[in-house]
Amino acid sequence: MTLEPVLLGFKVLFLLLLYLFIFRVVRGVARDLKGGGEPAVMPAPASVRAAPVAAAAIPPKPAPMVRGERRPERTGESEDEVGNTSEFDYLTAKIKPRLIVQHSKVVDGGKAYRLKGGATIGRSPRSDIVLDDSYVSSTHARIFSRRQFLYLEDLGSTNGTYVDGRRVSGDVQIKPGQEIVIGDTIFRYEE
């Protein structure tokens, strides 16, 4: 038995798989560039203030605390459901969290975006920070507060969101001096 026909069969199979892989990659890139790679419907999180949601879906803001008063225990709510807290509201008055544009093709460098409890970032005009960039999804990412910290969450964008060179999956706490890359725009988070 000769091995030549078997080897020829493996070569043909390998080339077919290689061409199939290249075809899928090219098709995916073409779809992403046209903007067709975004999900058709993406539910808006309840804590995003710019997204239109039913009034019943938004948890009530906690009442301001009087000095010496204890906050009642929460029952049945997780921190994520509560959203912005009075501790964060107090801190934002003192630290003034903001995103500073370091480099961008669509926004002037040095522009500052104030983050009062959070913001949505995307290509949509309804976003709090609008980036008219083909590499940015309609609703690309959001920044929200949890207790006294700000977090960044990628909202299923095609090209991803990066903090200090690492792709964000889930939500990640952002700290002063970190670089946030969305599309071709580089922000620096400052307080």
Image (cartoon, helix red, strand yellow):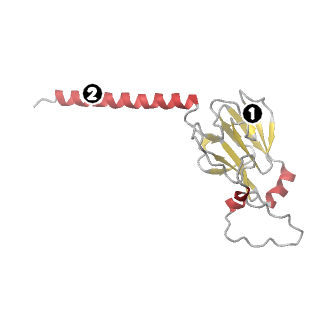
10 Å neighbourhood of mark 1: few (<14), some, or many (≥20)? some
Q: Is residue 54 above or below residue 184?
A: below
Query: Quadrant location of the N terminus?
Result: top left
Where is mark 2, residue-wise?
A: 12
Instruction: Report the Cα–Cα distance between label 1 and label 2.
Output: 50 Å
In terms of depth relative to the viewer, which is nearer, 10 or 50?
50
What numbered label is drawn on residue 90? none
Horizontal relation, residue 10 to residue 123: left or right: left
10 Å neighbourhood of mark 2: few (<14), some, or many (≥20)? few
Closer mark to the observer between disc 1 and disc 2: 2
> Where, by quadrant of the figure, is residue 42 drawn?
top right
> Where, by quadrant of the figure, is residue 2 drawn?
top left
Horizontal relation, residue 68 to residue 136: left or right: right
Where is mark 1, residue-wise?
A: 102
Local secondary structure at mark 2: helix
Local secondary structure at mark 1: strand
